[in-house]
Amino acid sequence: MSFSYTLIGSNGTKIPIIGSCDEHAEGTDSPARQYALLGRRAEEQVTRALISSARAALDDGQSLTFGKFTISEAGIQGKRGLIPWSEATVSTNGGRVTVSRDGKLFSAASENVADIPNVSLLLTIVDAYRRGADAPSSGG
């Protein structure tokens, strides 16, 4: 497993967390596994901290941009236009996030996970809209 997280402070300070480990060969106390766990926990906490403001922005009719993807209450937009939530398929595979329209062969957009700021927030919101619900509140 390879991992790469960059924590960016409000003052612009960047802290990279980069590494790899064999999940099956290394013990749970190995430094690489601990760094991977730190990155996952940071990602969860950042998503939790940002979800309520993201939800409020979407509820106010604003759009949010995550790399090549723009999301709104209407759907998700890639290079080939807006796809309504009811027709959107978002998948992660091989280190990429891909958006496509149900039943279409070609993707509307695809981008490396590493190139999408707050990818966990994007995927959390997408999951909520795909389930037909509003984005989850920060209280959960």
Image (spheres, grey):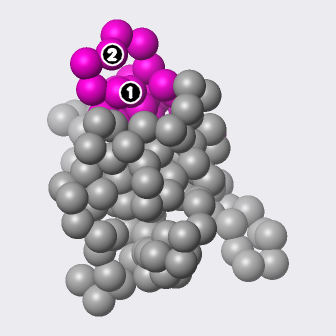
- Total number of numbered labels? 2
Residue identified by numbered label 1 = 100
Q: Position of residue 50 (x, y in %)?
A: 50, 76
For the C terminus, the quadrant is bottom left
Which quadrant of the structure image shows residue 88? Answer: top left
Q: Which residues are magenta?
A: 89-115
Q: Is residue 72 magenta?
A: no
Residue type, mark 1 in image: Ser
Disc 2 is placed on an element classified as: loop
> Does the residue at mark 1 contact the one at mark 2 (Cβ under 8 Å)?
yes
- Left/right placement of residue 9 relative to residue 98 reads right
Residue 82 versus residue 55 in the image, above or below: above
Q: Residue at x 32, y 81 (%)?
A: 137
**Nearer the observer, 27 or 58:** 58
Which quadrant of the structure image shows residue 29? Answer: bottom left
For the N terminus, the quadrant is top left
Q: Position of residue 103 (x, y in %)?
A: 25, 18
Residue type, mark 2 in image: Lys
Give the main secondary structure of the magenta stretch: strand
Q: Residue at x 57, y 48 (%)?
A: 70
Residue 88 versus residue 74 in the image, above or below: above
Q: Residue at x 62, y 38 (%)?
A: 68
Residue 115 versus residue 126 in the image, above or below: above
Residue identified by numbered label 2 = 104
User: Within 10 angstroms of label 2, few (less than 14), some, or many (20 or more) residues?
Assistant: few
Q: Is residue 95 magenta?
A: yes
- Left/right placement of residue 18 relative to residue 59 reads right
**Nearer the observer, 116 or 77:** 77
Q: For the view shown, which residue lies furthest in the bottom direction?
A: 139
Q: Residue at x 38, y 68 (%)?
A: 44
